[in-house]
């Protein structure tokens, strides 16, 4: 005869099994319903955001064409992001049009929203805010951004803050203020600093006369407190922006400095502007291999007969010097090719001959 335990335990086990299966099915159904509702919510938010961006873009276009349209008042950070994104694709060549649109944007109350978000605890939100401010290109944010940058501990947000500053310069003098703040954080890469400087230079040239911008750049080149990394980035920025009027200032800066990185940057900047100077020619015989290679790669646009000097460098015991020389001669087209042919056919130095033949084989 079965005991009570023998009857109750199987029934209880079966009930627990059925309950577990039902619970699992209900949980799975709830999960799918929740995911569906979330997807619907996200799609609705994206559709709403896209519509708001298109609406703002249409108003901005109408303002630029002279129509009397007003932007909606900005009440949330999301609305501010939509307005910034709508402005991102707009390119206003006329200064008066750009100033009028900036004034209309200020009247939406966006400044208050952005400055409040700058102090958010979530660093991702602060980063997002800096990106939006960069897209706005509005000088009204510059002072607050610069003050904030001095206290930001997160390096990513700090870098994005400087990036926002670079497009928000109001006066040429702001360039030096930005450079001073950047000197306080030397851990930033030189390429990032170069990007900030180039964006700043473009923003200033769009709003001010070339003479004013050139004056503040010269002052920045001559500032003794500038770190070598930032000074190098500034020199390269000037060269890549093809500001030929500052070539003498760059050369003077390189002559005055004892840092190899400054001399090399000056040579590269001159080369970017398709210029050559005695600084580069003197560097061809430098005892510093780094300076010598930079000079070799930068003498491409020399007006004189520099090919013979380069030809002799193909006999250098340094592979890097020979390679840089061969590549430079190759880039000088016919006049360089003649030297390479001469070295490849007549020289007895097997290393020079091999490098010349290799360069010619590249076409």
Image (cartoon, rainbow, N blue to C red):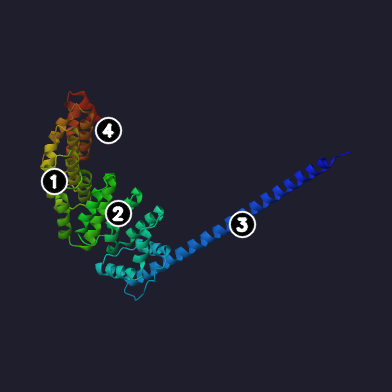
Q: Which structural element holds mark 1?
A: helix
Residue 89 shows in this picture: no
State the residue in front, 79 or 356. Answer: 79
Q: Nearer the viewer, mark 2 or mark 3?
A: 2
Q: Is residue 279 left or right of residue 200?
A: left
For mark 3, what is the residue?
33
What residue did someone put label 1 on?
Answer: 253
Q: Say which residue appears at 22% left-offset and 50% top-offset.
A: 237
The residue where tag 2 is placed is 149
CA separation in Å, label 2 and label 1: 28 Å
Q: Are marks 4 and 2 in contact (CB under 8 Å)?
A: no
Image point 16% across, 50% down: which residue? 221
Q: Residues within 10 Å of mark 2 (few under 14, many from 20)?
A: many
Calculate the distance from the C-alpha at mark 2 to the C-alpha at mark 3: 45 Å
The N terminus, quarter of image: top right
Q: Position of residue 335 (x, y in %)?
A: 16, 38
Q: CA distance from mark 4 to mark 1?
A: 39 Å
Q: Is the C-beta separation of discs 2 and 3 under 8 Å? A: no
Q: Which mark is residue 361?
A: 4
Front label number (4 vs 2): 2
Q: Position of residue 289 (x, y in %)?
A: 19, 32
Q: Which circle's residue, 3 or 1, is located before the other in the chain?
A: 3
Q: Is residue 198 above or below residue 95?
A: above
The percent coordinates of residue 315 (x first, y second) are: 17, 27
**Residue nearest the observer in this picture, 104 or 242:** 104
């Amino acid at each position: 005869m079965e005991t009570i335990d023998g009857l109750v335990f199987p029934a209880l086990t079966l009930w627990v099994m059925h309950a577990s299966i039902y619970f699992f099915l209900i949980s799975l159904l709830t999960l799918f319903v929740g995911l569906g509702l979330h997807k619907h919510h996200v799609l609705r938010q994206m559709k709403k955001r896209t519509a708001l961006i298109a609406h703002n873009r249409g108003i901005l276009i109408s303002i630029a064409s002279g129509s009397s349209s007003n932007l909606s008042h900005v009440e949330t950070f999301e609305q501010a992001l939509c307005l910034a994104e709508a402005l991102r694709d707009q390119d206003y060549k006329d200064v008066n049009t750009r100033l009028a649109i900036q004034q209309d944007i200020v009247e939406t109350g966006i400044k208050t929203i952005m400055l409040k978000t700058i102090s958010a605890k979530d660093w991702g939100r602060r980063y997002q805010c800096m990106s939006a401010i960069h897209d706005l290109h509005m000088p009204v944010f510059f002072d607050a951004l610069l003050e904030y940058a001095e206290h930001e501990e997160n390096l990513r947000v700090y870098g994005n803050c400087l990036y926002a500053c670079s497009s928000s310069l109001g006066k040429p003098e702001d360039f030096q203020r930005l450079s001073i703040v950047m000197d306080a954080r030397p851990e930033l890469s030189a390429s990032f600093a170069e990007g900030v400087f180039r964006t700043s230079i473009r923003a200033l040239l769009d709003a001010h006369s070339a003479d004013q911008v050139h004056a503040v750049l010269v002052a920045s080149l001559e500032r003794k407190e500038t770190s070598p990394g930032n000074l190098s980035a500034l020199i390269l920025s000037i060269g890549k922006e093809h500001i030929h009027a500052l070539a003498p200032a760059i050369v003077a800066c390189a002559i005055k400095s004892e840092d190899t990185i400054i001399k090399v940057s000056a040579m590269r900047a001159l080369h970017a502007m398709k210029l050559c100077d005695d600084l580069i020619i003197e560097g061809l015989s430098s005892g510093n291999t780094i300076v010598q290679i930079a000079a070799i790669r930068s003498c491409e646009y020399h007006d004189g007969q520099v090919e013979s000097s380069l030809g002799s460098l193909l006999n250098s015991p340094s592979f890097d010097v020979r390679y840089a020389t061969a590549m430079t001669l190759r880039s000088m087209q016919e006049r360089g090719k003649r030297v390479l042919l001469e070295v490849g056919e007549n020289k007895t130095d097997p290393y020079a001959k091999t490098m010349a033949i290799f360069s010619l084989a590249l076409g």
